[in-house]
């Protein structure tokens, strides 16, 4: 297993635990967050880019596959709004890889791992072509005018899903 932290910052030498902003987590315990390689595509967008992501798991139904995937070879989708396309083309991301020994799983379906100890990356990978990197990883990239319909619909499926930065998404249509 490989674990990463994704950032637009190129010069991070140490990741110190931070108190989580999520209210469902212990507010007394600082954490360093990482994502597993399977869910890494969910974070291969500009930081504030709203996105709906989903991927197959062992319980994904054939009906859901037919409704939400473009082909039988697609297993992972990242959907963004059209207005983020140009920003996506010009953003550089840095993947900081961690030694996994201090991490534990926080949310298996989302691929989240955390450590309570400071972490020094073992490797940094620079990505200048986000769309190309997603395609290389066999991820379907969708451009939509508004994410809210997909957001609502995908939550009712058998996929593993994640919605990120939805506060930056276009207004919900009625």
Image (tube, grey):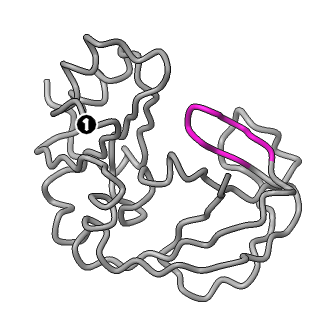
Quarter of the image where one finds residue 92: bottom left
Which stretch appears magenta?
Answer: 104-113
Quadrant of image for the C terminus: top left
> In x, y percent, where is residue 171?
21, 40
Looking at the image, residue 43 sits to the left or right of residue 50; the answer is: right
Which class describes the residues within 10 Å of circle 1: few (<14), some (14-19), or many (20+)? few
Q: Which residue is mark 1?
A: 73
Q: Secondary structure at mark 1?
A: loop
What residue is shown at x 60% (from left), y 52% (from top)? Answer: 35
What residue is shown at x 54% (from left), y 71% (from top)? Answer: 95
Quarter of the image where one finds residue 25: top right
Looking at the image, residue 112 sits to the left or right of residue 90; the answer is: right
> In x, y percent, where is residue 23?
69, 37
Answer whether residue 91 is magenta in the image.
no
Determine the residue located farthest toward the front in the rendered image: 73
> In x, y percent, where is residue 165?
41, 49
């Amino acid at each position: 297993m490989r674990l990463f932290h994704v950032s637009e910052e190129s010069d991070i030498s140490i990741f110190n635990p931070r108190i989580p902003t999520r209210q469902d987590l212990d507010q007394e315990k600082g954490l360093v967050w990482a994502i597993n390689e399977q869910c890494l595509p969910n974070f291969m967008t500009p930081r504030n880019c709203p996105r709906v992501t989903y991927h197959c798991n062992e319980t994904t139904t054939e009906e859901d596959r037919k409704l939400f995937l473009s082909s039988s070879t697609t297993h992972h989708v990242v959907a963004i709004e059209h207005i983020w396309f140009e920003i996506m083309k010009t953003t550089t991301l840095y993947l900081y890889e961690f030694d996994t020994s201090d991490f534990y799983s926080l949310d298996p379906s989302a691929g989240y791992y955390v450590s309570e100890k400071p972490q020094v990356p073992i490797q940094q990978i620079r990505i200048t072509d986000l769309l190309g990197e997603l395609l290389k990883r066999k991820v379907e990239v969708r451009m939509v005018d508004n994410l809210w319909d997909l957001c609502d619909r995908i939550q009712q499926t058998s996929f593993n899903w994640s919605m990120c930065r939805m506060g930056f998404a276009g207004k919900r249509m009625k």
